Image (tube, grey):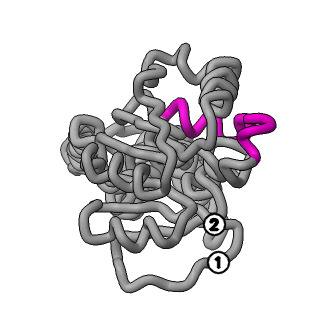
């Protein structure tokens, strides 16, 4: 009976190891892309430790010890052993059941972990550390400087992404305005939305100008890793100078030859929040 139980344990461990190896090969292809180096090394170390332990348990010397021969009770125990062997080695039942058990254990261990928004932001921005972004049509509901003469409204759906960007990047917001009252409305709307309370963005990093060329000049001087804009002309002219750009446009804009220019209907959709 003891020999059969040990054999069953050995088979279960072998099946677990087989499923584990497949899962690890799939996991490593993803984890080293999404996680930072320290986390990846820690997971790799855990995997090595588990595999080493499995191989140690797989060793025949670790599972099968020398059993002293018992005499005198073979006749009385033969029927019990025969029944146990029949139960443990029923064809088509035991193997399938053990495979299922091992697969369930491995699947439970490798439940997919959804990346956080912060991890997505860092991945999408390609480790960029400085970002410039237009306000109208990206952060604000309004679509033109003329609209800002009446009101300024922060888009609620963009707030979470914007705050994550400020935690990781040096963010500058900018917009063309037609009067001083528009500037006050914009700053008040950003303050009421709580954008300045996160600590990553201050009012001095919200820039205003009177022309589109002025906004383009701001971007050139700041030399960001990323610029986000709705104006295709500015996107086109900055393509030679800025490493990456995001063109925010509700409709599909004309394709550009610049591989560094990405497009999305909104900032939050670019980061997969919708």
Say whether residue 107 is left or right of residue 11.
right
> Mark 2 — residue?
249
Q: Is residue 123 visible?
A: yes
Cα distance between the residues tagged 1 and 2: 7 Å
Residue at x-position 69% and y-position 53%: 144
- What's the magenta region? 147-164
Q: Position of residue 178 (x, y in %)?
A: 62, 43
Q: Which mark is residue 252?
A: 1
* Disc 2 element: loop
Q: Is residue 159 above or below residue 56?
A: above
Q: Position of residue 119 (x, y in %)?
A: 44, 41
Residue at x-position 45% and y-position 24%: 201
Say whether residue 124 is left or right of residue 232.
left
Q: Is residue 263 above or below residue 186?
A: below
Q: Can you tell which quarter of the image residue 29 is in?
A: bottom left
Residue at x-position 45% and y-position 16%: 199
Magenta span: chief secondary structure: helix
Q: Are marks 1 and 2 in contact (CB under 8 Å)?
A: yes
Q: Position of residue 68 (x, y in %)?
A: 26, 36
Q: Is residue 68 visible?
A: no
Residue at x-position 56% and y-position 58%: 270
Q: Residue furthest right?
A: 150
Residue closest to the eye, 144 or 57: 144
**Marker count (numbered):** 2
Q: Which mark is residue 31?
A: none
Residue closest to the eye, 258 or 232: 232
Task: Assess disc 2: are there few (<14), some (14-19) or many (≥20) residues with their C-alpha within 10 Å of its C-alpha.
Answer: some
Q: Can you tell which quarter of the image residue 95 is in?
A: bottom right
* Disc 1 element: loop
Q: Position of residue 132 (x, y in %)?
A: 41, 45
């Amino acid at each position: 009976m003891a020999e059969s139980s040990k054999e069953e344990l050995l088979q279960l461990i072998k099946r677990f190891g087989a499923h584990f190896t497949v899962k690890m090969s799939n996991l490593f292809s993803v984890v080293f892309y999404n996680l930072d180096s320290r986390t990846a090394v820690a997971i790799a170390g855990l995997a090595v430790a588990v595999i080493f332990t499995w191989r140690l348990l797989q060793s025949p010397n670790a599972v099968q010890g020398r059993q002293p021969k018992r005499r005198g009770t073979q006749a009385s125990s033969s029927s019990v052993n025969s029944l146990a062997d029949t139960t443990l080695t029923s064809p088509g039942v035991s193997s399938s059941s053990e495979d299922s058990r091992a697969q369930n254990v491995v699947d439970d261990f490798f439940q997919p972990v959804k990346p956080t928004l912060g991890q997505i932001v860092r991945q999408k921005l390609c480790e960029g550390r400085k970002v410039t972004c237009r306000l109208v049509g990206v952060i604000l509901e309004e679509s033109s400087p003329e609209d800002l003469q009446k009101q300024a409204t922060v888009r609620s759906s963009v707030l979470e992404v914007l705050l994550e960007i400020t935690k990781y990047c040096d963010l500058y917001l900018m917009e063309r305005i037609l009067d001083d009252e528009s500037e006050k409305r914009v700053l008040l709307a950003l303050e009421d939305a709580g954008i300045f309370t996160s600590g990553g963005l201050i009012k001095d990093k919200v820039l205003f100008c009177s022309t589109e060329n002025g906004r383009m000049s701001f971007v050139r001087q700041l030399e960001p890793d990323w610029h986000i804009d709705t104006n295709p002309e500015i996107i086109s002219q900055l393509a030679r100078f800025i490493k990456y750009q995001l063109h925010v446009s509700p409709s599909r804009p004309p394709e550009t030859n610049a591989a560094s220019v990405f497009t999305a209907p909104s900032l939050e959709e670019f980061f997969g929040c919708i």
